[in-house]
Image (tube, rainbow, N blue to C red):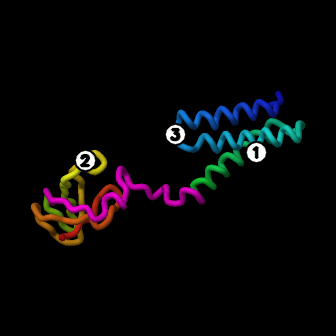
Amino acid sequence: MQIEWWQWAVAGIVLVLSELAVPAFVLVWFGLGALVVALIVAVLPQFGVTAQLSVWLVVSVGLVALWFKIFKPNFHKTRVGMSDANVIGEVGLLTRDVAPFQNGEVRFQKPMVGSDVWPCMADEAIPAGVRVKVLTVEGSLLKVGKI
């Protein structure tokens, strides 16, 4: 069975358009890979099915890797549920004691990402009821310090 160039082109267009329904921005790269194979098969009609599939896979995965390497280099560092820039510097009230090896809890006046209470940690012992400032985000914990 030989896959024709127009079949690759239709598959590529369908994948690119399906990105509108699945907003992950990954399907578009597989669609562009299919369009590249459509061009190759249009120029070289004797190109085998195995070679076509191999080229499609290599080009698609290469485009995805290029996307995450060049255009989204820090995508893997995204924190769970919050952005550093939106949280650092916020002031809250400690509702549970925190110590260097004991997690506490901080409450904010305005909810951040759907919650006004977040687990926290600190380099020093801070009793409950003290106002604290967010210094950094470490995983899903906020690192706080006294004001």
- CA–CA distance between discs 1 and 2? 47 Å
- CA–CA distance between discs 1 and 3? 25 Å
Q: Nearer the viewer, residue 107 or 101?
A: 107
Identify the disc placed on residue 128.
none
Whichever of labels 1 and 2 marks the residue nearer the N terminus, that label is: 1
Disc 1 residue type (three-letter): Val
Identify the disc placed on residue 115.
2
Secondary structure of the residue carrying tag 2 is: strand
Quarter of the figure with the C terminus: bottom left
Q: Which residue is mark 1?
A: 55
Secondary structure of the residue carrying tag 3 is: loop
Q: Is 78 in the magenta?
A: yes
Left or right, residue 113 beside residue 66: left
Q: Residue at x 24, y 63 (%)?
A: 121
> Residue 33 at x, y = what percent?
71, 43
Q: Residues within 10 Å of mark 1 (few under 14, many from 20)?
A: some
Whichever of labels 1 and 3 marks the residue nearer the N terminus, that label is: 3
Identify the residue at the far top of this view.
1
- CA–CA distance between discs 3 and 2? 25 Å
Q: Which residue is mark 3?
A: 23
Q: Which residues are magenta?
A: 69-95
Left or right, residue 114 beside residue 72: left
Residue 54 appears in the figure:
no
> Residue 67 at x, y = what percent?
60, 53
Disc 2 residue type (three-letter): Ser
Q: Residues within 10 Å of mark 2 (few under 14, many from 20)?
A: few
Q: Residue 93 lies in what quarter of the image?
A: bottom left
Residue 2 appears in the figure:
yes
Q: Residue at x 22, y 50 (%)?
A: 116
